[in-house]
Image (cartoon, helix red, strand yellow):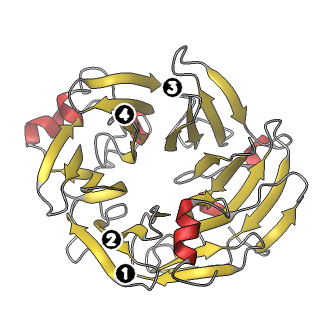
Amino acid sequence: MRITNTGLLYDDPTRSTLGYMLICPVDGDKTFLLKPDGSVAHRWKTKNGMTNWAYLRPNGNLVRNERCANPQGVALTVSGRISEYAPDNSLVWRHDDPYQHHDARRLDDGAIYAAFTELSDTVKANIPGGHAGTETPGGPFGEVIRRVNDAGQVEFEWHFTDHFMDRYMLYPNSNKWSYGHTNTVCPLDDGTYLISSKNLNLIFILDPQDGVIWEYQSDEMSGQHDAQMLDNGNVLVFANGVYQSDLHHSQVLEIDRVTNEVVWRYKAKDDFTSFFSPHMGGAQRLPSGNTLICEGNKGCLFEVTPTGDIVREFVSPHFVQSETFGRINWLFRARWYAPDAPEIRALERSVTL
């Protein structure tokens, strides 16, 4: 896709939500904290990564994924390294797992993340569904949710193939790179984890002691990303729409966990196919009630009201020359921070924004 206009394209300050945005361009080695006008407030120069994400800790440190020296598993999605950086770019903590991919979150002691696992030939042959002939070299791989402590010791593991293969099949036109294709591992306040499995069209809550305590599976999500728990107990998710048979389009869905009903959705009002990000994306509910949407494959961040009006639109000018994809400005996800958020206040004590 040709992108001709970048930067802040539109803003209605009477209805948009003032704040900073944190972005981490896919396949790049920089992370940017953006001011409300889209200019750079602060940047970190780090190691290169693939399915890049980044977020700020309450102490102002940056956590992001990077590519390790010997990544294993699915080459297009694996990173293998979780790093924490201080505002001055100095390394604070790092954990390498060559099978780590997509999402990870720093904990008070260690981290929780998704990783590939090697499967036996018997298990590989019995993985249900998916598009035959799309197996990646060495695959299909298994998926594990893995928690480690600060020293890198494994404290908890949960394997998809042990729990879901008799219930959920890979979507028929999904690739067979792995069974699960996890892209969200989000710790919740009660010690459980909110998980998104792209090629099962499944999101669920995992209790380390009791196993799966809630799940939602719907073809409408169609390769979803970035599941998040809202303050009202509902789940917000970016529904990519990549597995739809025709008229591909993305949506953002809010799901009531009691009824498993969609209680709010965003899709483009006019040409609904104009909003589409096939392989990445995210959404974040803002304090104003608006929703920030990351249309990742276009590098576009836009804010919508509860009624779906676009009140702010920004297209990333931070391009990367990727060996795999060419010149891109893709954003796997983005995060918004209020000017008085603890993360921003802590960062301001170290650097000038």
Q: Secondary structure at mark 1?
A: loop
Nearest the viewer among 150 and 266 is 150
Q: What is the number of the mark on residue 193?
A: none
Q: Residue visible at 52% across and 53% down?
A: 279
Nearest the viewer among 178 and 16 is 16
Nearest the viewer among 82 and 150 is 150
Which residue in the structure is indicated by mark 4? 190
Identify the amino acid type marked 4.
Asp
In primary-sequence order, the first of circles 3 and 4 is 4
Q: Is residue 21 left or right of residue 3?
A: left
Which residue in the structure is indicated by mark 3? 218
| Residue 73 image point, x, y percent | 23, 59
Q: Secondary structure at mark 2?
A: strand
Q: What is the number of the mark on residue 83?
A: 2
Q: Nearer the viewer, mark 4 or mark 1?
A: 4
Location of residue 281 with respect to 194 vertically, above or below: below
Q: Is residue 158 left or right of residue 56?
A: left
Identify the amino acid type marked 1.
Lys
In 3D space, how far apart are the residues under numbered discs 3 and 4 (Cα atoms)? 25 Å
| Residue 320 image point, x, y percent | 54, 80
Which residue in the structure is indicated by mark 1? 47
Q: Nearer the viewer, mark 3 or mark 1?
A: 1
Identify the amino acid type marked 3.
Ser
Nearest the viewer among 202 and 155 is 155
In primary-sequence order, the first of circles 3 and 1 is 1
